[in-house]
Image: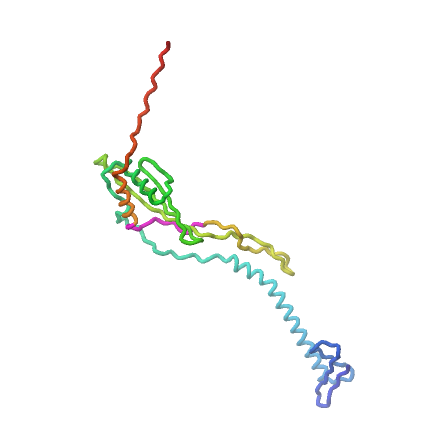
Amino acid sequence: MRSTCGRAGRCTSWRRPDAPAGRLFFSRAGSSLPCRALAFTVFVRRSFRMSWVVMWRRWWVGVAPWGLTACVGWPAATAPLHDYQPERFDGAAYVRHFKVDPTRSCEAARRALLSQGYVVTSTQAEQVSGRKYFQPSPEHHVQLEFRVVCASETDDAEAAVVFVSGLREQYIVRKNKESASVGVGGLGSLSLPVEGSMDSMVKVASETVTDAALYRRFFELLGTYLDRVAVPERRTPQAATPERLS
């Protein structure tokens, strides 16, 4: 179809019946300068709009994977320290004196730990250790270990001084990260870290228990077993007698 320009300099455009919606056709023959300028302006605007959309899409496809990688691999913020108590060496919560020998004292400590569900990990004549496990939440694990050392008094061999200390360790569940390859148009394949299905326990805290009431209850429980402890006597090996030759 042909387009004409009126006397006022306005361009009249025609649309072909089979043309897409919004697409105009201008005729070069017999058209005035304003008509050609209008056609050129429409062409430039549409070209610039299409090129801008294409550039924006290419930029988004290229930058989006790198932004995703930065978000996934960004390290977690370090948690601040809470309830930190500096050492003063002015407490007597970790020691008690008993009128029994060190061997019986440690045996009573071993029985006290066993009565509370602790797993005894080390047992000696004057030292015993036990560990207990707790699960406050599905992703939080706590281990509590008690270590007891029994020493004899310098002025009385039948008296002992008992030292005890508790260690609390905390663990959390952390998913292992795995890498996956993602195909990106124009860039090839890109490796991204993703969360895997395998979980592992990671230690996040380890501190000495400073609760004086907890140690007081432990020593009270230990005292209930002192009178009922029977330490087996040590047998001295007998020397082998030489056989008589007939």
Q: Quadrant of residue 221?
A: top left
The image shows residue 200 at horizontal and vertical percentages of 48, 49
Apparent side of residue 77 relative to residue 23 in the rendered image (left or right): left
At x 30%, y 32%, the residue is: 232
The image shows residue 100 at horizontal and vertical percentages of 24, 37
Task: Say which quadrant the C terminus sits in.
Answer: top left
Q: Is residue 207 magenta?
A: yes
Q: Residue furthest right?
A: 29
Task: Say which quadrant the N terminus sits in.
Answer: bottom right
Q: Quadrant of residue 192?
A: bottom right
Magenta span: 202-213
Q: Is residue 112 magenta?
A: no
Residue 12 vertical placement versus 88 (above, below)? below
Foreground of the two, 5 or 22: 22
Foreground of the two, 159 or 76: 159
The image shows residue 26 at horizontal and vertical percentages of 74, 80
Q: Residue furthest bottom?
A: 7
At x 40%, y 53%, the residue is: 136
Apparent side of residue 40 relative to residue 225 in the rendered image (left or right): right
Residue 35 vertical placement versus 117 (above, below)? below
Apparent side of residue 131 relative to residue 212 in the rendered image (left or right): right
Residue 163 vertical placement versus 77 (above, below)? above
The image shows residue 109 at horizontal and vertical percentages of 30, 41
